[in-house]
Image: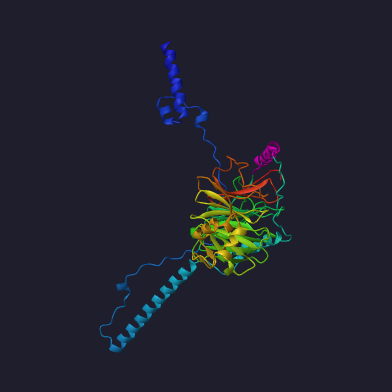
Amino acid sequence: MCELEREANIARNRALLEELELKQAVSGLGFTPSASKLAPKAKAQPVQPRKRKKEIIEVEAPRRQSSRLKKAAIDLDESPSKRQKREAESELIRAQEAEARLEAEERARIASRPRRHDLELSVLLGEEETEGASPLAAVLRDVVQEPHPRRVADPEEFNYGKDNKKEEAKVNELRERLQSLKIVSRAKVTQDRVYSAAYHPEISKDLIFFGDKHGQLGIWDARAPSDEVTDEDGQAETSENAEGGKYWRLQVHWPATSKSSISTVKMDPINARNVYTSSYDCSVRCLSFETGISRQVYATEDGALISSIDFNPAGNEMWLSDSLGGVTHLDLRENESKTRWYGLSEQKIGCLSLNPTRPNFLLTASNNRSLKIWDTRKLTEIAVELSSADSDATGPEYGTETVNKWLDKDSGKGCLRAEWRHDKSVSSAYWDPRGRSIGDLVARLTDNEKITAVQAVTCSHPNIIERAASGNASGRCVLWSIPSE
């Protein structure tokens, strides 16, 4: 009986060690681990970016030279006139070197400043990718053949009153449709972390725009035939982890550092023929698909980082939120000097969203752990009533103190329509397409065989429910769809 107990203890210890994956301890005790424990676990492999041929030019680094050794040997018997000539030549050389050094420093300083002028596709792509300007221009021109206005939902659609069962049934149906999505294409669209994304409404192709940490706008034609990549022997490379579609990387905001992170990407709500980007370089730019020109639309003068933008349905007014806790109203039909700034929070407003069916309702999400809904009609009345009476209302800027005084007045009632405290930092919030509620979680998309990294940003096709895209911290992006499509 003791022998049976001893063998049972050995079996239990071996199973326990194998569960803890202590293989060395198992082998040290003379046990043979099971084959299932020794087999390596399959891990999801990231998509491998295509190898791009680049001509590498090796430039010899400047070598340090001793100033003593640089001095030419002095002829002890030289005449006074020759000495004066030699000293004058040396002084001239020193002056030229100093001037060249100052010019190099000035060029470096200018290169580190944000670019405020118009930029063409060839400039945005960079010298190494100029050959991609023509194919990209063709893709952009292809999607402007017909206008694609932003759809506005009926606010009364799917309104079942107190019949919660019908609403739950519709939500469950939507959830089932979204859970059927699978990965159909992958690519490393941007070089750095994806910060923002937007899906073009064209239904004949999947054209997605991703903004990254260093001011780069990645344009991904996710279903386009990929360029054939060959190995060293000239054979076409094939791999299940190969990239899908075609993409282009545009350096829209400058410099290419974290000071130029693209915080928002928005399509023109009128015809989707322009894409707008806001950046931490304190500017908003617009890239035209018809001309291929990127132009600056707006830039802050106080160094406030622009965190998000949104448009009214007519596309002629833009609202911006910033790191100072304010929102800016910009009428695109007027001069930039006509903008108005309102301090709505003591802390950063990370996101704002205009109601798609009632555009006078503005939703803000702030680091003060609250969501607020504002009536923009009341906000614009501040300029009329308080600008001449309040010292804080300086010109087009109305600080937090001014706004709070306005809210306490009878004429300011109704300006702040609602407020929710989250007790958490609210990074983003958006209206649903009907403008009846603030977006809620519907589904989670996962594929442990192909991706393991957390998807930092998601966006969906405006006209096709079963189509979505996402991007992660390494710039790798994923297209989700029904595989048969």
Q: From the viewer's perspective, is 312 left or right of 23?
A: right
Q: Is residue 149 visible?
A: yes
Residue 165 within the magenta-colored segment of the rendering: yes
Residue 248 vs residue 334, the one in the foreground: 334
Question: How far across and how far down the image is residue 483, in percent?
Answer: 68, 43
Q: Quadrant of residue 146?
A: bottom right
Instruction: Please identify the dominant SS of the magenta region.
Output: helix
Looking at the image, which residue is at 52% across and 29% down?
A: 36
Identify the residue at the far front of this view.
Answer: 410
Looking at the image, which residue is at 55% across and 43% down?
A: 45
Question: How far across and how far down the image is residue 44, in percent?
Answer: 56, 41
Question: How far across and how far down the image is residue 93, in percent?
Answer: 38, 79
Identify the residue at the far top of this view.
Answer: 1
Which portion, as a residue range, is magenta? 162-182
Question: How far across and how far down the image is residue 423, in percent?
Answer: 50, 45
Q: Name the quarter where the N terminus is drawn.
A: top left
Residue 299 vs residue 60, the one in the foreground: 299
Residue 412 within the magenta-colored segment of the rendering: no
Looking at the image, which residue is at 37% across and 81% down?
A: 92
Identify the residue at the far right of this view.
Answer: 146
Q: From the viewer's perspective, is 227 left or right of 27?
A: right
